[in-house]
Image (tube, helix red, strand yellow):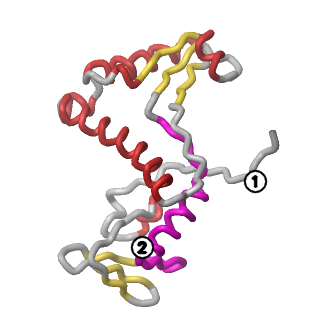
Amino acid sequence: PSAPTEKYGRDAARAVSLAMYETVDNVGEVCERENIDAHYAKGGELEIARAAYDLPKLEEMYNEYRSIGLEDHYRLFDKAETEERIRVAGAVGSFWNMEGAAIQPARLARGLARAVERHGGTIYEQTRVTQFVPGPLPRLDTERGNVSAKAIVLAGEAYLSQIPQVSRRIVPATSHIVITEPLSD
């Protein structure tokens, strides 16, 4: 079992995994319901082993999911099975997470913004938040003034680390997004 399974228990690890599957499906449902063309495609995700020494890590991942009864959401592929799905130089095997999906992130963000506004929400852009006040009367303090709301969602990725209240709880690691024009066939 993994360290999180040991620390929080099998039931918690299973519940978190199931919630993550539901979240992926929820993105697709919202795209459909709100008519957001984010190119949502649930086809799974492959983690590739490019050398024999990578294979035990993939096996360990599979065994962790099996230990909480979720092995039917995952598969281990050998070299030939991997090559049937994707050509990666030096690939010797892979771990398939069937619950993964792909989206076009800029289309999703724009579509969600339009949906929020269509449903009466207000989006404040280009406004740096300097502090937030949680509780029954939540508020965001900005360089231009304060914004009060019924609810506040802190969804600023690594930028949240710039807010003093959460700066010691968030560690920016890395984020890579590539946005291109549609590629020809």
- Above or below, comparing residue 60 to residue 47 in the picture: above
Residue 139: numbered disc: none
Q: CA distance from mark 2 to mark 1?
A: 29 Å
Give amino acid for label 2.
His
- Residue 40 left/right relative to 65: right
Compare marks 2 and 1 and give the one earlier in the sequence: 2
Q: Residues within 10 Å of mark 1 (few under 14, many from 20)?
A: few
Q: Residues within 10 Å of mark 2 (few under 14, many from 20)?
A: few
**Mark 1 lies on residue:** 181
- The answer to whether marks 2 and 1 mark residues whose Cβ atoms lie closer than 8 Å is no
The front one of 62 and 118 is 118
Query: Callout 1: helix, strand or loop?
Result: loop
Q: Single out the residue that lies furthest toward the right.
A: 184
- Numbered range of the magenta stretch: 100-129
Q: Is residue 117 magenta?
A: yes
Q: Using the rendered view, name the quadrant where residue 9 is placed.
A: top left
Give amino acid for label 1.
Glu
- Above or below, comparing residue 105 to residue 89 in the picture: below
Residue 119: numbered disc: 2
- Above or below, comparing residue 175 to residue 3 in the picture: below
The front one of 103 and 12 is 103
Name the residue rendered at 42%, 73% in the picture: 119
Quadrant holding the C terminus: top right
Of badges 2 and 1, the one in the foreground is 2
Q: Position of residue 127 (x, y in %)?
A: 49, 80
- Residue 113 left/right relative to 183: left
- Above or below, comparing residue 111 to residue 102 in the picture: below
Q: Is residue 119 magenta?
A: yes
Q: Position of residue 153 (x, y in %)?
A: 35, 67
